Image (cartoon, grey):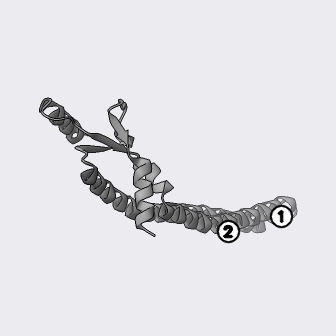
Amino acid sequence: MFRFLFLVIVLFATGPAHATKLGMVDFQRAVSETNEGKAATAKIETMYQNRIKEMERMEAELKKEYEDYQSRAMILSPEAQQEAQRIIMEKEQRYGATQQQYQQELQQAQGQALMELSEKIKSMAGTMGKELGYDLIIEAGVVLYVGTGVTDLTTDLVERYNASSK
């Protein structure tokens, strides 16, 4: 953040020797709007849907086990009650661990796929900035205010990226 502010101060402190050309890119939007980003997101969602079905199956099994226990609890011996409770607790723990594992896998897959794409897009933004004569291209996610002198290059960047990856 301090490096960004320093760059802006230095850029504007040099005076009006030449007009400064500023651009901005919303990298999160760019990643999600590219064909590659859409395909990666769809693949991850498909993978996650299978995981959701598995979790729903486990939850239904756990609920049935608990309902069966409750309906039989009055006729079970204390030892049988303890054993049934132990089995239910084990299944609850397995359910929680599986849910946590699936969530971690999903986050890891999203991070991996989108990180690689993000790096490619950032590289293309630098190339595009040089070609179009921009002095500075900033990330939209860290900017609080954008005046009229800053050009949003996100749509152009997405179009260029999609065209180059065909």
Residue shown at 40% from the left, 62% from the top: 117
Relative to the observer, which residue lies in front, 60 or 132?
132
Question: Picture coordinates of residue 45 (x, y %)?
Answer: 59, 63
Front: mark 2 or 1: 2
Q: Which residue is mark 1?
A: 68
| Left-right relation of 18 to 155 | left
Q: Residues within 10 Å of mark 2 (few under 14, many from 20)?
A: some
CB-based contact (under 8 Å), mark 2 and mark 1: no
Judged left or right of residue 85, residue 14 is left
Between 139 and 48, the one lying in front of the other is 139
At label 2, which amino acid type do we have? Glu
Residue under the image location 66 percent in, 63 percent down: 52
**Which residue type carries mark 1?**
Asp
Taking the image as shown, residue 108 lies to the left or right of residue 71, namely left
Q: Which element type, helix, strand or loop, lies under badge 1?
A: helix
Residue 82, image quadrant: bottom right
Q: What percent of the width, then of the height, locates residue 166?
A: 46, 70
Callout 1 environment at 10 Å: few (<14), some (14 to 19), or many (20+)? few
Instruction: Read off the residue under disc 2.
Output: 54
Query: Where does residue 40 sit, x and y in percent of width and height?
Result: 51, 65
- Picture quadrant where residue 126 is located: bottom left
**Residue at image x 38%, y 58%?**
118
**Quadrant placement of the N terminus:** top left
> Where residue 6 sits in the image (x, y, percent)?
18, 37
> Which numbered disc, 2 or 1, marks the residue that appears first in the sequence?
2
Q: Is residue 32 above or below residue 75?
A: above
Which residue lies at the image location 76% right of the left edge and 63% below the top edge? 60
